[in-house]
Each structure stands twice: as C-alpha cells, then as structure tokens.
Amino acid sequence: MINYQPSDHPDFAARAAANQAERAADLKTTYDFIVCGAGSAGSVLARRLAENPAVQVLLIEAGGSDERTSVMEPGAWPTNLGTDTDWGFMAEPNPALNGRAMPMSMGKVCGGGSSINVMVWARGHRSDWDHFAAESGDASWGYEAVLGLYREIENWQGAADPARRGSGGPVFVQPAPDPGPAAYAMIDAAQELGIPTYASPNGQMMEGAGGCAISDLVIRNGKRHSMFRAFTYPFLDRPNLTLLTDTQVNRVLIQDGRAFGVEVLRNGALHRFKAAHEVILSLGAIQTPTVLMRSGIGEEAELRAHDIKLVSKLSGVGANLQDHVSFGCTWEYREPIAPRNNGSEATLYWKSDAALADPDLLFCQVEFPVPSPETAPRGVPEHGWTMFAGLAQPKSRGRVRLVSADPNVGPRIELNTFGHPDDLKAALACVELCRDLGNTQAFAPLVTREAMPGSLNKADMEQYVRDAAVTYWHQTCSAKMGRDAMSVVDAELRVYGIEGLRVADGSIMPTITTGNTMAPCVIIGEKASRYIRATHGL
C-alpha cells in the first residue's frame, strides 16, 4: 500500500530546497529558539516549535543531507558505519573486554541516529517510564501518560489496538512486511521454549515479563522513515524554519546565568547566533555533555584541566553513560536466504533470571552474520544469521570526558562495559538463551550448524563474551534528568543553574530504556516541545 503525504509531491523537494537556500543566504543574528541537532529528538522539537508561524526556529546539524542511498534504502544501513554519516567515536580500551576499544557509531546526518539505525520502533517497557516519573518527580513521564503521546504521534499500520496504538500521527509504523523465514522461526523458537509471543513488540508485551514478536519498523513506501523525514522535512518549505547543515556547535553562550546563543564551527570559521528565548541541545549522549563542558557546565576539576571557566558546577555532566551491549551468536544457513526489509525482523525481550520482575535481555534476529573483529577468526559462514542479543538493563556506568576545549578534538569515552560484575553474569545467561533459541527444532529446517560460539566451558565462554561484545549504538544517560546531586536537568529538561537552556535527547534518561532508543527519544522531543510552548505561551 502506498502512503501519500503532501511532502511526497514532486514539487515539494524543489520548493523546500529553494526556501532553505534563501534562509541560508540571509541568516539572522537572532532566532527565537535554537535547536542543536537534527536527530530523533531535535527533529521533533524543531517541527513542533515551527508549527507556530510567528516563531523563528534555527535547527543546526553537524552532518549533511540525508538524500543518499545508504540512508534511504532500508537494507543499506550497515554501509553508513565508518562513513561521513557517522561520528565514528571510539571508546577507550577496556581491560574487561580483553583490552579492546569498542567503536561507537552515532549519526552525523539529518535525522541523526534515526537515519543510520536499524529502523526498529521500540517504545520502552512500562517500568522504564514509571522509573523516569519517579526520578523526575513528574507523573507526566510515567507509562500511562507517555502511552497517550505514543498514540498521538503514531500512524500505526498493524492490527487495531486503540488502547495502545494511534493512527494519523506523523510516524508511520508497521510490522515488518513479509518477514523472512528466520523471523518466523524465531517466533516458533520462543514458543518452543515457553516464551510468550505477541502480535507486536510494543503494547502488552512491554507491560509485563516480555516476549517475542515480529518487529515494528519505521519503513514507509519501501524507504527509511527517519524522524527527520517524519517531522522536520515536511516543514522545510516554511519561512520560519531554518536548517543549517554542516555546522558543528562548539559551545553555548552564557551571560549572568542565562544562555543567550551558541557558537558554531561552519566552513572552518566560528560564528555566533543568538536565541531570544531558549537554546536546546539535542546532540546525543556523547556530544551534548561535551558541548555543556565546553560551555563551562560540568564537574569543576574536569573544566579546570582544560582552562574552561566554570559557569555552573554540575558533576553529573558526562557521568552515568549507558549503552546496550550485544553478543552475536551465529548459525550457518542450509542455503542462502536474502535479508528482507532492514535485515532484522523479529525481536525478543526476556529475563536473565526468572526472579526478575521485568525483562533485562534484548534479542534481535539479524538475517546475516554479525561477528566482532575478535570473533571473526573463529569462522564466519558465507551465509547465515545472527542472534544479536545483549543486556537491556546493564548495571555498568561509564563517562564522557573532555580531551580538549578545541571543538575539532573528540571527547574521551569511558564506556566501562562489564564494570559491574552482574553484567557478565547476565551476559553469560543471555548467550545460553541465544544458543537454546537457535538450536530449537524451529530453526532446524534453515540451518546446518551453530557457527559460534558452540558448546564451551565457563572460562572459554567468558572469553567469547568479552571478545564478542559490541555496542547496540544506544548511548544514553550522560546528562540525566532527576533531583539528586548528579542530575543535570529537571523534569522539564531545564539545565540546572542556567536559564534558557534545555537538553532534549537520550542523554537525559536516568536509566537506559528497554530496547532500541529511537522511539523514546521522540517522546523526549515531544515532551520538551510541550514544556517550551507552555513556558512561552506558544
């Protein structure tokens, strides 16, 4: 079924391009709001503010256009990794990973992570949102309230579920269309092991112990439906929205405790833009704390080491960094089976320990081999599939630190994977469940053998887990929302101690959500827009 929107009209692209060229040729010195980062949250926020024609919005993006095959074609997403659409961050070498330094890809393109990710729409578990509400002291962050926001923003294409799913919103969400045989085998494998299955991984499945389902994807008319395409792109023909690409935010300009603009790096030169009302950082969990620290907001010793004047002492800036870590287990196909859609069409959430109340493990069935560089020498089948599974609720905490005040120098990322001993225990349970799933009768017609890890003793399995560990690219929580001494923003996402400055991206999560983080970041953008509009009577 073809889903048509006004921005699909052939004339729209030319009109939007002409409008943005005009905006760029006549840049203002002052805008009402400056949104830094056109990712999953920033794209939402810019659109919602620009819905008021009286409001002038500047949206700044370090990357360039999303008009490229690697972004728009769902199956091409792996080709973005390590290219100019990827920040290409690298975490510090970690003794708990046998000294490995883990690559930390993040989107550097219009749409941010939503333009280079796997397009999975995962709304988070009930307990995630209720925890946000408890940490912030604001019930509107709780599950029932957030469920209402999801119903508003979704244009759900699956089976009707009016209590949990919405229609007519900007985000086109559908169950993976015509999934491949490995996806259906995963559903059957879960049933074989007594794990419940559902029509959707969102809704009832994420209100209890978990389960297995065909993935919900943001693919529309066969193309990636990024949050930039869903929210911002349809407004690019408007005179009150200016999108400035290939422009990196260096720091927030602050005077007398108030943010009044930003300093950016564009075409090799520094420029300044003023904000009449607010600056909002939506740069992601690596760049947001980095920019805050370069602006004088952070832990005092950290700033002093780089000769940055302290503006606001917030020790939590850069702390509490979290990520989902995965361990790929691979099987060899009996015969080649081409991946479909995004190549990841079934998902499962379950528990490493039956005594847990909520799922702490995340499983994505991937329709091609996904080894780490360290496990690849074990032998990667030419044709096969991977159970890409890992920790949905890791206990380890990392930190983002400055290396230099120079915006051209990237930060130091201390991911600290396996820093908490419980995470290794959960990882071993995760891999065993992977092996149980992949070796069920459900997969027998498709595979000839388990390529890795195979049956290993405890010491060898620990070695495998440390070598196999890779990121899910879900870096979050480094500027957390809350009310304790390590919190960076309050319930309305205002940076403590600074007027006119908010953060709206995955860095504000107190703890990482269960599952892929794009959809929760959209909610964060929605929430921020509502707080801002209420503050300024928009």
Image (spheres, rainbow, N blue to C red):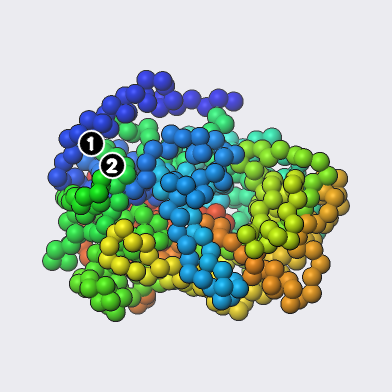
Q: Nearer the viewer, residue 257 or 367?
A: 367
Residue appearing at x 20%, y 52% in the figure: 270
Q: Is residue 54 at least partly visible in the picture?
A: yes
Q: Nearer the viewer, residue 19 or 48?
A: 19
Q: CA distance from mark 1 to mark 2?
A: 7 Å
The x, y position of residue 23, in whole percent, is: 22, 34
Residue that badge 1 annotates: 24
The x, y position of residue 236, in whole percent, is: 32, 33
| Residue kind at label 2, given as amino acid type | Leu
Mark 1: secondary structure:
helix
Mark 2: secondary structure:
strand
The x, y position of residue 229, in whole percent, is: 43, 37
Q: Is residue 13 above or below residue 90?
A: above
Quick check: 349 left or right of 292? right
Q: Is residue 156 above or below residue 206?
A: above
Q: Is residue 329 above or below residue 108?
A: below
Circle 2 residues within 10 Å: few <14, some 14–19, many ≥20: many
Q: Report if the CB atoms under discs 1 and 2 are less than 8 Å apart.
A: yes
Residue appearing at x 37%, y 70% in the figure: 401
* Of pointers 1 and 2, the one earlier in the residue sequence: 1
Classify the position of the N terminus by image quarter: top right
Q: Nearer the viewer, residue 132 or 326?
A: 326
Quick check: 38 left or right of 441? left
Q: Nearer the viewer, residue 302 or 514?
A: 302
Image quarter for residue 514?
A: bottom right
Quick check: 85 left or right of 339? left
Circle 1 residues within 10 Å: few <14, some 14–19, many ≥20: some
Image quarter for residue 508?
A: bottom left
Image quarter for residue 139?
A: bottom left
Residue that badge 2 annotates: 244
